Image (cartoon, helix red, strand yellow):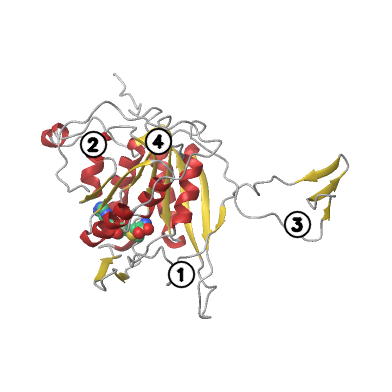
Amino acid sequence: MKRRSREMPGGGPRPAGARRRRGSAEERTSAFTSVDALLGRVHLGDNLDLMRRLPDGCCQLVYADPPFASGRARVGRDANGATMRFSDGFPGGTPGWITFLKPRLIEMRRLLSPDGSLYLHLDPRVAAYARVELDRIFGEENFLNEIVWCYRTGSRPGRHFPRKHDTILLYAQQRGKQVFNVVRDGEYRTQGLRRDGNGRPFKRTRRGPLYFHADGPALTDVWDVPFLSTVSAERTGYPTQKPLRLLELMIRTSTNRGAVVADFFCGSGTTLAAAQRLGRRWIGCDVCEAAVAVARRRLALGSEPDPPGPNDPPVGLGDRTAPMSQGAWAGDGL
Ligand SMILES: C[S@@+](CC[C@H](N)C(=O)[O-])C[C@H]1O[C@@H](n2cnc3c(N)ncnc32)[C@H](O)[C@@H]1O
């Protein structure tokens, strides 16, 4: 009997759970062969519809910050004081949430280039369930890190330790091929160390003085990034908005200038704003009209990209897009 090939179009073997896309004839004819025409836009609609129309391997980084199935209604206010809300509840609780997430994770893997990475942002309650699914979809060998984003927000003493971190699961499309730029962040603990004649702290070792890297320590899997304060200039009023700094760490680590960064649960557009600032190209999507309006406003106000750093490769090096696009996405773009 002839065995079916398990090769994935983006490269690498097809992990269990990652079925070949079927889709209706209509869906297939409205597929794009390139993301070019969709870049720099915030699309309104269900992300599964959009992702299914995008070509294999077109993104170098996908960040996903989906609803967590906490059952809580998320409410915020925009600049004009209008209420913005989205529901974080799922029929069927956690199993219902996994049912929702799974086909989207499969699409995200398909959309990643062989040097691409997925960052899935969750809370510690649901992270374990998603990790099992991701191991099936990406392959256990492609798991890179469980990043702990810790923050210090106010808390009331209760019957368990205050929960002060989120969990971000990082997977490579193909381990070993992923872009991984070492980012240096924070400061060394140099208290009590000797200093040389120039005031530089050093450790004494048998082989002589050991100096610290001038740009600070390499970022580890524990990220101490302040939560957005209620008075932060970054605040859009959208509930669950994440700090730009958090996204900048991911984008700087896992992409080069000119690469395509995607956020299909983009909310207020934090990922897209960070990508724009760092000279990356981007595509965003959200099903909520208020979110899309906030993100579009934020990006229209946007800033010029920061100038390239000394280690940045030329723009375009991370570009894995295919030739010009065809077809039309039914959703609404910026
Ligand atoms: C946790 S929020 C993202 C917040 C975002 N990271 C930010 O910094 O503003 C999750 C978003 O997912 C959106 N969402 C939920 N289901 C979706 C779907 N099927 N397609 C697209 N977006 C969806 C919600 O409307 C919400 O804006």
Quarter of the rendered structure image containing ligand 1: bottom left
Q: Are marks 2 and 1 in contact (CB under 8 Å)?
A: no
Q: CA distance from mark 1 to mark 3?
A: 29 Å
Residue 151 appears left or right of 6: right
Residue 28 appears left or right of 71: left
Residue 245 point in image, percent of width and height: 48, 55
The one of 151 and 7 positioned closer to us in this rendering: 151
Return the residue at label 3.
190
Residue 54 point in image, percent of width and height: 25, 36
Task: Find the residue positioned furthest to the top.
Answer: 2
Check disc 2 and give the amino acid type: Ala
Return the residue at label 2.
37
Classify mark 3: residues with Cα within 10 Å, few (<14), some (14-19) or many (20+): few
Task: State which quarter of the image contains the N terminus.
Answer: top left
> What residue lies at 53% left-to-right and 75% top-to-bottom?
160
Classify mark 4: residues with Cα within 10 Å, few (<14), some (14-19) or many (20+): many
